[in-house]
């Protein structure tokens, strides 16, 4: 189809360069970083060329050796995930998860807007290594500019012979189809993403099977990888797994993109060394966020996207490493840190997250659909000063119907509270339900006095207004 | 009654042809309908059902799940103010109040002239640039009340590049026929891709 009336595409702001080796953001400084010309002149498609000179199994091993952890949230090694495809079952598909919408997360959109060819090259390498016959690049519906950038890049890549039939003159042939969503957070869950791609309501599938690699799109083996994960592949193939594992730690090699938002002096997206950079480096480092706004005190921060239990200043020295953060009661998730300074109204802040998850519940599992809604309404009553002290227990009671048992949380030495390690147990298929409870549980555990102040003096319970929209 | 224009119908067939199963084109076709009309009406869903070989109830089922599909007319410009945590910490609540009073409506409402619809939205992946909003799914960063007023004025006087509601990507993917590998429906038994064979693709 012809291009429609073109309008200038504004550059996405947000990225801040620091001293870290740059793997996925290496072209972000160029005004024309999204063009094929710039990509080719800065080493673009070299990883693919190198891959095509080797056998698919060798390429797969290289990625497995690199211990490239999934950057979407769960942190599962991509090379191992690829290996879950049952042998001799064809066709098999690649679905790219570009449905970035976890609260606080801002990296995949940058990668798609500023370096779409790097993502395309990553898709091609994955398809070659695992023998995937078609790739669907699922971009979040609300990202019009990312869709434009990727569409243009795909058109250019097809014309130049990088995508489609007989790539670079070899037998390797694969299509990349641009697909886009229509506004539903839960579609970021990989089985919901597949449902959505099949034209259905985006509801997560029952597990097992735990990995769509065995049964996925149309019941066929399907690899679902995050945008940032795939964007690492060109570099790994060009420089080798050894160069990749030389950065970061043994268990978390390479770099990660992390978005720091909220009350810091320089909120931004940073590429940091995985495993060694600490939260303090990020929040206070002079080449990073530069401290809390107005030199206020730090009250709390969310370390890994809206679903993650909260941390306090006592956890600042933990490194960005899953095996350190998990036992301390939270997770790294999607690389999103939200910072709250001393002026923050904690119950109100928790409400902004619980409201999100209640709103985004797909409605499949009752504990999430009903529990999330009630959590939001009870918390709203507390925040607005209409709650009673019984409401605070009620919040925990409702939360426990979604997550029975001890919910993970950070230690607060000053209050004698010990950490409960991640993860939680849950009564729902996916993580949306527990995520509605996570901010409430964290806020109540760490800052119960703020809730008590809001309900002080209220003994008579007020009815919750249930608005019915017909 | 037919809904799609001839040009869009042709485009619809091209989109369907890219998927192993037609139903996968459901969301792209609903977007196409919304692009044509500004919202998704019943005729559109009926025709999409015919194109995909399913029922209009199935199309409605999918359509009603997704926030972006409007089943009632909305303004030419849909303004979504993010109200999730990062934006809320940086003043999204005040921005929303300001927007409501500037446009003279409540979140969820439209102006009588059909120009604006205002909505509270969830995280828009621009958290470091808070508070942010989107006009027809195009971002505006670190928006102050004054900037909001300016934005509304620019949009009202057509002094803006932002296309009408329903238009997402202004660049469409086009796969040249001679490069299109084609998709194989899963039920057709196929063997491993040739490049996975011993010396496939290499000499």
Image: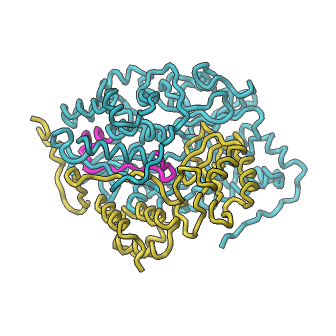
Chain colours: A cyan, B yellow
Residue range corresponding to the magenta coloring: A123-145
Position of residue A256 relative to residue A87, above or below, is above
Instruction: Compare residues A435 and A107 and report the one nearer the observer.
Output: A107
Where the C terminus of chain B falls, by quadrant?
top left
- At a point 53% along the width and 58% down the height, the residue shown is B164
- At a point 37% along the width and 24% down the height, the residue shown is A244
Quick one: which residue is furthest to the bottom in this view?
A: B1
Total labels: the figure holds: 0
Q: Quadrant of residue A297?
A: top right
Instruction: Compare residues A56 and A98 and report the one nearer the observer.
Output: A98
Instruction: Compare residues A164 and A214 and report the one nearer the observer.
Output: A164
Position of residue A147 relative to residue B13, above or below, is above
Where the N terminus of chain B falls, by quadrant?
bottom left
Quick one: which residue is furthest to the left in this view?
A: B203
Q: Position of residue A382 (x, y in %)?
A: 79, 52
- At a point 61% along the width and 38% down the height, the residue shown is B129
The answer to whether residue A306 is seen in the rendering is no
Quick one: which residue is furthest to the right in this view?
A: A457
Instruction: Compare residues A362 and A289 and report the one nearer the observer.
Output: A289
Left or right: A361, with A168 as reference point: right
Q: Position of residue A48 (x, y in %)?
A: 26, 34
Q: Is residue A327 magenta?
A: no
Q: Position of residue B125 (x, y in %)?
A: 55, 43
Q: Position of residue B189 (x, y in %)?
A: 19, 59
The answer to whether residue B26 is seen in the rendering is yes
Left or right: A153, with A257 as reference point: left
- At a point 43% along the width and 76% down the height, the residue shown is B46
Left or right: A316, with A136 as reference point: right
């Amino acid at each position: 189809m012809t291009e429609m009336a073109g309008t200038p595409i504004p550059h996405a702001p947000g990225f801040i360069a620091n001293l870290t080796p740059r793997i996925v953001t290496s072209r972000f400084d160029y005004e024309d970083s999204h063009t094929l010309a710039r990509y080719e002149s800065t080493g673009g498609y070299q990883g693919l060329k190198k891959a095509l000179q080797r056998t698919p199994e060798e390429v797969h091993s290289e990625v497995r050796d690199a211990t490239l952890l999934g950057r979407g949230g769960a942190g599962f090694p991509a090379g191992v995930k690829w290996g879950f495809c049952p042998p001799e079952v064809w066709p098999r598909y690649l679905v790219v998860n570009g449905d970035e919408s976890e609260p606080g997360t801002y990296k995949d959109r940058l990668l798609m807007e500023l370096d779409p060819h790097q993502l395309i090259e990553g898709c091609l390498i994955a398809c070659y290594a695992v023998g995937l016959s078609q790739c669907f690049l699922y971009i979040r519906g609300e990202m019009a500019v990312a869709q434009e950038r990727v569409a243009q890049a795909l058109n250019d890549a097809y014309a130049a012979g990088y995508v489609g039939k007989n790539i670079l003159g070899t037998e390797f042939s694969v299509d990349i189809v641009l697909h886009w969503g229509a506004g539903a957070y839960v579609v970021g869950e990989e089985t919901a993403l597949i449902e959505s791609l099949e034209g259905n309501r985006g509801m997560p599938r029952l597990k097992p099977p735990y990995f769509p690699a065995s049964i996925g799109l149309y019941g066929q083996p399907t690899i679902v990888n995050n945008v940032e994960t795939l964007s690492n592949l060109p570099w790994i193939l060009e420089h080798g797994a050894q160069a990749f594992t030389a950065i970061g730690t043994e268990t978390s090699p390479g770099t990660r993109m992390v978005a720091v938002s909220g009350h810091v002096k320089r909120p931004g997206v940073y590429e940091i060394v995985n495993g060694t950079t600490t939260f303090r480096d990020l929040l206070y480092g002079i080449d990073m966020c530069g401290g809390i706004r107005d030199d206020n005190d730090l009250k709390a921060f969310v370390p890994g996207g809206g679903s993650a239990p909260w941390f306090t200043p006592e956890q600042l020295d933990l490194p960005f490493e899953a095996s350190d953060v998990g036992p301390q009661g939270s997770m790294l998730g999607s690389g999103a840190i939200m910072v709250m300074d001393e002026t923050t109204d904690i119950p109100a802040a928790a409400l902004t997250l619980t409201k999100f998850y209640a709103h985004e519940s797909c409605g499949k599992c009752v504990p999430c659909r009903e529990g999330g809604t009630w959590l939001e309404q009870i918390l709203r009553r507390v925040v607005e000063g209409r709650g009673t002290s019984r409401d605070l227990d009620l919040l925990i009671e409702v939360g426990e119907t979604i997550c029975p048992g001890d919910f993970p949380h950070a230690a607060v030495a000053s209050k004698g509270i010990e950490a409960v390690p991640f993860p939680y147990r849950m009564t729902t298929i996916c993580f949306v339900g527990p995520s509605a409870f996570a901010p409430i549980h964290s806020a109540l555990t760490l800052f119960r006095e703020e809730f008590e102040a809001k309900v002080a003096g209220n003994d008579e319970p007020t009815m919750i207004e249930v608005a019915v929209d017909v | 009654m037919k809904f799609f224009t001839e040009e869009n119908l042709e485009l619809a067939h091209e989109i369907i042809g890219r998927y192993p199963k037609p139903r996968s084109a459901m969301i792209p076709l609903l977007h196409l309908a919304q692009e044509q009309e500004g919202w998704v009406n019943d005729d559109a869903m009926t025709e999409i059902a015919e194109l995909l070989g399913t029922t209009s109830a199935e199309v409605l089922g999918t359509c009603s799940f997704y926030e972006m599909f409007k089943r009632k007319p909305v303004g030419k410009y849909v303004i979504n103010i993010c109200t999730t945590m990062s934006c809320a910490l940086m003043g999204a609540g005040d921005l929303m109040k300001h927007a409501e009073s500037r446009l003279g409506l409540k979140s969820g409402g439209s102006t009588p002239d059909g120009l604006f619809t205002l909505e509270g939205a969830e995280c828009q992946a621009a958290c470091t640039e808070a508070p942010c909003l989107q006009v027809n799914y195009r971002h505006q960063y670190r928006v102050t009340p004054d900037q909001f007023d300016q934005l509304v004025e620019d949009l009202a006087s057509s002094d803006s590049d932002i296309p009408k509601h329903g238009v997402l990507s202004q660049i469409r993917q086009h796969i040249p026929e001679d490069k299109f590998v084609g998709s194989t429906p899963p039920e057709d038994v196929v063997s491993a891709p040739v490049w996975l064979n011993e010396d496939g693709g290499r000499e």
